[in-house]
Structure formats: C-alpha cells, structure tokens
Amino acid sequence: MRVCVLMGSPRLEGNTAELCKPFMDELELHKCGVEYITLHGKSIAPCLACYACQDVPGEYGCVQRDDMQGIVERILKADVLVFATPIYIWQSTPPMKALMDRLYGLNKYYGSAPREVLNEGQSYALIATCGYDVTYGAGLLDEGIGRWCKHSGLSYLGMYAVRDRDDLASFRTEDAVSGAREFARKLIRLAGGARHPETAGSLGVVAQVLPYINEKYREKLTLKTVADHFFINPAYLGQQFKLKTGHSFKDHITGLKMEKAKALLSDTNKSILEIAGELGFDNANYFSGRFSRRTGTTPTEYRQLTTNNEQRTTNN
C-alpha cells in the first residue's frame, strides 16, 4: 500500500510533524510505501474558480503553473492520502486549504469533460493537532473532509487528532505515540485494497466492522462509537453500511438482538426482564415493544407459540 502524507504545518519540526513520526514509522514497519510532502515553501496559489480544469478530460488540467502539478502527480500514485495539519481557526493551514481547493481538478463534474474522478478508489485520512478538545477543535475539518469524500465517491478513513497541552511533549506521550501507530494499522486494515477492488472484498470497510458489531451488539453501540473505534467518519460508515448490507446500522443491531431474543425465549426459561437486560435493554417494556414491532408478536406470545409448536412436534 502506498501512502502520501501531506504536511501542512509551517513548522517542519513542530507538533504535527512530531505526531506523524510514529504514524509513518508504523506504516513502514508494515512494508507500506510512504511519501512525505511538506507544503510550506511550495508555490501553491489559491484556486481561481475559473472552471478551466473541468473542460480537460483525463488529466488534472489546472491552468495555473506552480508546484501543484508535481504534487498532484505524486498524489495520484498513492492508495491513501493523509492530510496532516495543525488547526488554524477551525480549518487547515493556508497552504493545505489552497491545495485542497486546487484538487477540485480531479473531479470532472461541471464542464465539458466526461464525468470522472481521476483518483477514484483512493482513500483520505486526517492527522490534526489543535489547542482545544479534539472534537471541538478539529471536528469541523474532519466533517468537511468526510463530506468531500462522499461527494467524490472516495473512502474517508477518519481522523487522528491530539490536543496540544504542553507543546512537543504532548505529542511524545505514550498515549499519543501508541494512538498514532494504531491509526496507521487501522488505515492498513481498512484501505489495504482500496484502489484494487478485486482484492478488497465486496463489503469494503463494512467487512472490518461487522465482526466487531456481531460480538459487541449487547453493548450500547452507536454509529459514532463504532466509527470512532475504527477511525472512520460516521457519515461515511453509515452510508457504506446501508449500501453494502441493504439496511441501516441501527436496523442491523436491532436484528441481531431480536434473533438472540428469539433463541433465548425458545431455549431458556429466563424471564422477559432477564432477557431484556442480557441484550442491553434498560427497560423490559421497551424491549417488548421493539420485539413486537419486529416480529408481530409479544415476547410472551412468541414463547408460547414456540412451546406449542415443540409440543405438537413431540406428540407427532
């Protein structure tokens, strides 16, 4: 797997660069190809919104002649593109924002060129450092990249962010380093075959998530908690879950619980209250209501029905 890390910080030995070190080291330990591109000092002009790139088929097509052409060539060779940036006013740094805007030329959506995405199959990820709680500080950029990927039909593998509490020391802690390494391993698992669908499996990221859900469904799982566990954008995971399985994340969890409830009602003498608690429901009445809506019978009626069927089978 080839990973391109775009470094947006003007401090080439600063906090964000420090956080990237264990991340890239872990990638290289797993035999991934890593290219590290620093944007500070590069000539990356803002997008002119001229739409000229939308009339150039099969290639980038930007009319501005600066360092973006060479950067795009390197980006297109990667399976995963990682945006690494400190947060400036709830956004990326200026060169990173300019680069993101200029990548508009990869999507041929709005001109005479045939509709296509030049980096189809590529995955994006975000590494961020900020001075606030990471959700408050970096969440807006995280959400923006997730929407960008959805718009482009790309995979967003999520964000790893660490709060700056003590300058460089914050990014050398055991938690920060181990988190960066774990994020690298997550990307390898989720995007190992992203640009090679014949080896990635038809379920994609959902294949990584399903075993975890099937094991943990009794707990209070939400789309966000599962997405956070796998470093995936929640909106993207929900979209992929519906696309690949035909039903929503919530419906899948409910289905698992109801199938287990049927087995417990048929095969055990546990009370409705005990079964509800075992399946993670706080209230037996709520469980009974969900069961009735799902099956058309109450838990008590279902137990009696299965008992009667067993008795008839025995008598026959």
Image (tube, rainbow, N blue to C red):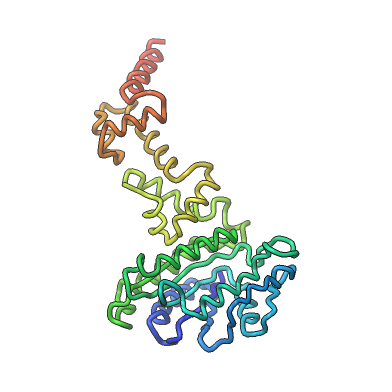
Report how many numbered discs are placed on residues in the image.
0
Image position of 48 with respect to 282: above or below: below
- In percent of the image, x 39 and y 72: which residue is there? 180
At which x and y percent is residue 269?
A: 26, 26
- In percent of the image, x 30 and y 76: which residue is there? 173
User: In which image quadrant can residue 233 be found?
Assistant: bottom left
Q: Looking at the rendering, in which quadrant would you find the C terminus?
A: top left
At which x and y percent is residue 40?
A: 50, 86
Is residue 163 shown left or right of residue 227? left
Is residue 224 shown left or right of residue 107? left
Image position of 225 with respect to 242: above or below: below
Please tell me which residue lies in front, 280 or 152: 152
Is residue 45 shown left or right of residue 52? left
Q: Looking at the rendering, in which quadrant would you find the N terminus?
A: bottom right
User: In which image quadrant can residue 129 be found?
Assistant: bottom left
Please tell me which residue lies in front, 69 or 207: 69
Please tell me which residue lies in front, 95 or 157: 95
At which x and y percent is residue 274?
A: 24, 33
Residue 185 can be seen in this image: no
- In percent of the image, x 62 and y 84: which residue is there? 67
Residue 45 can be seen in this image: yes
Please tell me which residue lies in front, 36 or 165: 165
User: In which image quadrant can residue 62 be found?
Assistant: bottom right
Q: Residue furthest top?
A: 316
